[in-house]
Amino acid sequence: MAQVDVRKALKYPPEVFMGIIVKDLSSGLNDIVSYTGLDVAKLFYALTGFSTSVASNVALDITSDGRPGYVTVSDLGAVRGLDYMEEVRVGCLRELIVRARAISDVSNFVFRYLIKASPAKAVHKLLYGETLTPRERELGEKLGIAESIRAYPVEVWNPYKGVLDIKYQSMLVSASATILRVTPKSGWKAVLLGISGERPASPNAFKISVSRDGLEDIMELDAYGLPTYATWWGSPAWNTLRVVAIDELLIEAEVTSGGPYKVRIVYGLAPVTVAEKIAWGLDLTAEDRRIADKLNLYDMVEAGILP
């Protein structure tokens, strides 16, 4: 499957998407994931985890903002495989490139990854040493962002933050169908947190797609690269999706051969906060505006401190 088109997928930031690449490697250098030509003024990306096939004599190299070898794995024969996510956090504002160097041809190599995305704000630029606009400098000084970054440890972002109820669905899928549809009540959001499943014997036999709020197929996942049904997701800060819907979360399966396949989906429900309404351009009530003014939420959202 193709890499996640973050520009298309992002709607309710910050969000975390899963991409699954299944690719035949040739001897030499192979591009796996490539987010290039990014606009520093618009989006901040962060690779928050990845998993690969166990493949001896294949090396992995991750380039971030012109820094080749920012993360390297010298031999993928030593990794734990697709049931485990390697914990990384690689932020970028200009480019993120993942390449694999193979000594010989490799068939059906899998690279699964999680990518977090949000608008590029003052807090991201200060963390990564980028030039601020006059307005961003004003916000940074007003809110003491630079001082806070120097004074306190950077908090690891948690996709579970603010999720009130967490639910899961397990199912057997033997034919193409809608396998989950969640319609949150007014003023609430649904948050997709995880997908795992039974891997088919070959690629393209079983696929899962995710749509929400009028955006179709924002994630198209070949189940050949999923973590298995029984996999424990581990640390929420690293190994979790965050795909938000306020109207409808829709997950569909396409089965072309084999089955039935086991699937496990984890999702949460929570009220939409005032800060989220501001960030996402939703309508505010009079009470929302009062709270926003009292707590200085407009500036905090604009600076990237919230949500």
Image (cartoon, rainbow, N blue to C red):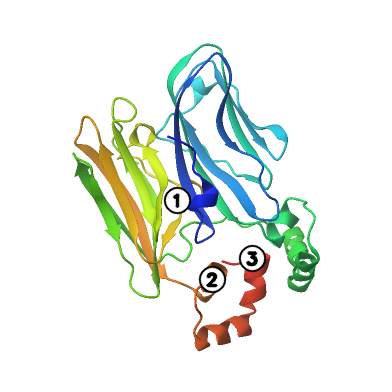
Can you give x and y, in whole percent of width and height, for residue 289 in the image? 56, 84
Amino acid bearing label 3: Ile
Say whether marks 1 and 3 touch (CB < 8 Å): no
Instruction: State the CA–CA distance, disc 2 to disc 1.
Output: 22 Å
Q: Amino acid at mark 2?
A: Gly
Residue placed at 62% from the left, 81% from the top?
Answer: 295
Residue highlighted by disc 3 = 305
In the rendered image of this protein, does residue 209 appear above or below residue 274? above
Residue at numbered disc 2: 281
Q: Quadrant of residue 156?
A: bottom right
Is 65 left or right of 192, judged from the image as shown? right
Mark toward the viewer: 3 or 2: 2
Can you give x and y, in whole percent of width and height, for residue 83 in the image? 39, 34
C-alpha distance separating marks 1 and 3 = 20 Å
- Sequence-wise, the earlier of marks 1 and 3 is 1
Label 3, label 2: how far apart the Cα atoms are: 16 Å
Q: Return the mark for residue 130.
A: none
Q: Residues within 10 Å of mark 3 (few under 14, many from 20)?
A: some
Under tag 1, what secondary structure?
loop
Q: Earlier in the sequence, mark 3 or mark 2?
A: 2
Label 2: which secondary element: loop
Task: Report the residue marked by disc 1.
Answer: 241
Q: Quadrant of the C terminus?
A: bottom right
Task: Identify the image quadrant of residue 304.
Answer: bottom right
Q: Single out the mark in the foreground, 2 or 1.
A: 2
Q: Which amino acid type corresponds to the residue marked 1 in the rendered image?
A: Leu
Between 189 and 213, the one nearer to me in the picture: 213
Q: Number of callouts in the render?
A: 3
